[in-house]
Image: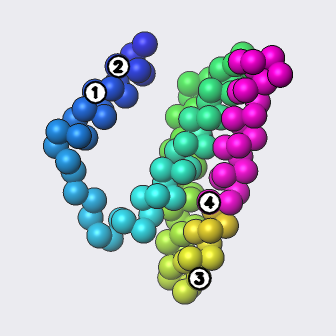
């Protein structure tokens, strides 16, 4: 319940304050969001499987975001940022859909 309240408060604060994303961070933000979504879907799946651990979730969440952003940053420095961004999104997308399918199987027993 605390997580839901925190999410609602965070969304409301974001809508009211309308924070500005620095231009240096803009290319990495979408990748970081996709990486965070991967961790969230993985956490939901682990919870439904009965193996959820909050420490593992926090470490997974932070490391996914940092590693994805670093890969895109390295790609930008090497001149292949768009290709690596696409690769990161494809890999994380596959993981997200895999976790979503497992969640669906748990919820609908299908």
Do the residues bearing badges 2 and 1 touch, measured as CB atoms within 8 Å? yes
Q: Which residue is mark 3?
A: 80
Outermost residue toward the right in this view: 110
Disc 1 element: helix
Task: Determine the CA span between mark 4 and mark 3.
Answer: 14 Å
Quadrant in which residue 6 is drawn = top left
> Where does the image place residue 32, in percent across and percent down from the top left?
49, 54
Left or right placement of residue 63 versus residue 2 in this view: right
Picture residue at 30% right of the left edge, 33% below the top: 10
| Majority secondary structure of magenta residues | helix
Q: Which residue is mark 1?
A: 9
> Where does the image place residue 23, in percent across and percent down from the top left?
29, 70
Sequence order check: which comes first, mark 4 or mark 3? Answer: 3
- Looking at the rendered image, the quarter that the N terminus falls into is top left
Q: Which residue is mark 2?
A: 5
Outermost residue toward the bottom in this view: 79
Picture residue at 78% right of the left edge, 24% below the top: 105
Disc 2 element: helix
> Where does the image place residue 11, in percent across and percent down from the top left?
30, 34
Sequence order check: which comes first, mark 2 or mark 4? Answer: 2
Out of 11 and 50, give the one closest to the viewer: 11
Residue 89's tag is 4
């Amino acid at each position: 319940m605390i997580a839901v309240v925190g999410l609602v408060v965070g969304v409301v604060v974001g809508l009211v304050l309308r924070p500005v994303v620095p231009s240096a961070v803009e290319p990495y933000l979408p990748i970081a969001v996709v990486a965070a979504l991967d961790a969230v879907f993985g956490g939901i799946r682990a919870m439904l499987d009965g193996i959820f651990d909050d420490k593992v979730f926090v470490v997974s969440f932070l490391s996914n975001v940092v590693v994805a952003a670093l890969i895109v940053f390295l790609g930008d420095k090497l001149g292949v940022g768009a290709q690596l961004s696409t690769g990161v999104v494809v890999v994380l997308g596959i993981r997200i859909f895999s976790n979503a399918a497992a969640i669906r199987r748990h919820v609908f027993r299908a």
